[in-house]
Amino acid sequence: MIDLQDRSHCPTLEEIGQHVKNPLFQKFCWEIKGKYKIIEKIEFSSCSLERGWNIKFKKAGKSLCTIYPREQYFTVLLVVGQKEKGAVEAALPGFTAGLQELYHRTKEGNGQRWLMIDLEDQDSMYYDVFRLIEIRRAR
């Protein structure tokens, strides 16, 4: 078992998947990699709120999302900035009630909302995350 707090060992995506113990994690990563033709970047964060190894997906220098591994689930950070705000808010009624609530509950700072979305199952929220990534990618 890997220690996600151990800065001296950069884990592989497979090792992180073994830590998460949820096949949805690997599926999510493979789906992003395949759809956007990108490679993950595994980084260590010293931030006190989310210290440890995380996975970033970027396309053309733009962050699409960051994944924070947990046990049995993972959290996806999606930033909704000024460029995406109008499109996200226009599409919001078509998202799940849970995502709408999270969006409205998340405070805006510096023109951005940092949505932390927990994924455990391939449910409607899973598809909402991909819709948000698509909006972010298009802007």
Image: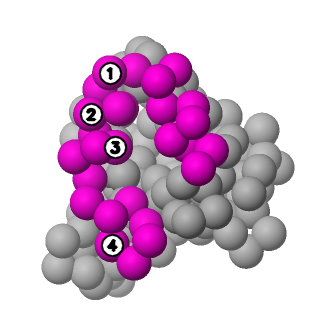
Name the mark on residue 97.
Answer: 1
Estimate how packed mark 1 is, as few (under 14), some (14 to 19) or many (20 or more) residues with alpha carbons within 10 Å: few
**Residue 86 x %, y %:** 59, 50
Q: Is residue 2 left or right of residue 135?
A: left
**Residue 97 x %, y %:** 32, 21
Q: Amino acid at mark 3?
A: Tyr
- How far apart in space, not on screen, are marks 1 and 3 (Cα)? 10 Å
Pointer 2 residue: 101
- How far apart in space, not on screen, are marks 4 and 2 (Cα)? 17 Å
Which segment did they paint magenta? 86-113
Pointer 4 residue: 109
Q: Quadrant of the C terminus?
A: bottom right
- How far apart in space, not on screen, are marks 1 and 2 (Cα)? 6 Å
- How far apart in space, not on screen, are marks 4 and 3 (Cα)? 13 Å
Q: Amino acid at mark 4?
A: Gly
- Rendered view: 66 above or below 123: below
- Rendered view: 85 above or below 83: above
Q: Are marks 1 and 2 in contact (CB under 8 Å)?
A: yes
| Dominant secondary structure, magenta | helix
Q: Amino acid at mark 1?
A: Ala
- Rendered view: 139 above or below 121: below
Label 3 element class: helix
Pointer 3 residue: 103
Q: Is residue 81 within the magenta segment? A: no
